Amino acid sequence: MSLFSDSELTQNDFLGGRVRLLQPRAGYRAGVDPVLLAAAVPATRGHTVLELGCGAGAAILCLLARVPGLQAVGVELQASYAELARRNAAENDAPLEIVEADLSELPAALKQRQFDHVIANPPYYRFGAHSPADDPGRSIALGEQTPLEAWIDCAAKRLAPRGYLHMIQKANRLPDILMACEGRLGSVEILPLAARAGRKAELVILRARKGGRADFQLRAPVVLHDGDRHERDGESYTPQVSDVLRKGASLPGFSDQ
């Protein structure tokens, strides 16, 4: 796959401009999902973090901007996005190492490392369950090629004892997530994300711990928007969610660590 030229890219601000991200005009473009994922991670200075499928780096760069002093690695399958993540790391002066690899075939050196946190925003749709996007990069980012179980298995193997996996995924994939965690990760918590009060959750964030033994927890939903319908003019995010997206605040909803 060829690398992106400058004319094929836009630069977008995240966290109120604390992260500036180059993204393809026509390929996969990050929205709020990776920002919410990064905001859920209870990382502190000195921790190590691995992102599986980092794309252009939105989630991991937002986490690095929110929590200084982390050591981070991103794994990305597509060469064009891996190179874009490297550019974005340099643009943001972020201590981020990018490894171009399939998560099912990680380099030997990476297999020798363990991390305090693993984060992931895997493709939302099962293989064959959606119409492929016209852009190949976007199609790979949205449509599952590696089974969800393989993502969680890889994460579990790379986590240090008592380390955390955080993953954002479609709510209808929750049965797959829970089955994949069985025997690999414990202390499972699920945080539903609902667009508005009274609506069903379309997304969930998983928190699971290597060696965890606490009971399963289904948390109260985080409501993203005020009001009962979309308003075309103005921003409708709740104050808490706006602080997450604009100011780098932590995402409320999980148990305290």
Image (cartoon, rainbow, N blue to C red):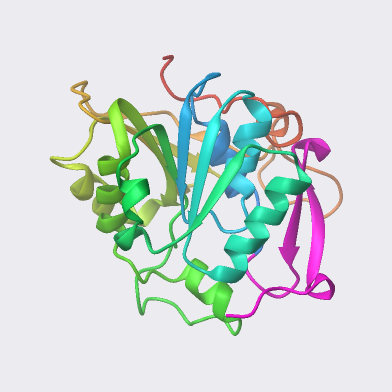
Which one is nearer the viewer's eye here, 224 or 10? Answer: 10
Does the magenta run of residues contain 133?
A: no
Does the magenta run of residues contain 13?
A: yes
Which one is nearer the viewer's eye here, 137 or 255? Answer: 137
Q: Quadrant of residue 80?
A: bottom right
Q: Quadrant of residue 94?
A: top right
**Residue reaching furthest bottom?**
134
Instruction: Please say if 142 is above or below 35.
Output: below
What residue lies at 21% left-to-right and 49% top-to-bottom? 180
Instruction: Please say if 102 is above or below 198.
Output: below
Q: How many numbered discs, if any?
A: 0
Instruction: Please say if 38 is above or below 138.
Output: above
What residue lies at 82% left-to-right and 70% top-to-bottom? 6
What residue lies at 13% left-to-right and 40% top-to-bottom? 183
List x then y, in percent, for residue 240. 66, 26
| Res 195 visible | no
Q: Which image quadrant: the N terminus? A: bottom right
Q: Which image quadrant: the C terminus? A: top left
**Residue reaching furthest front?**
109
| Res 40 visible | yes
List x then y, in percent, for residue 16. 81, 37
**Residue reaching furthest top?**
256
List x then y, in percent, for residue 179. 19, 49
**Residue reaching furthest left?**
183
Segment tinted magenta in the rendering = 1-28
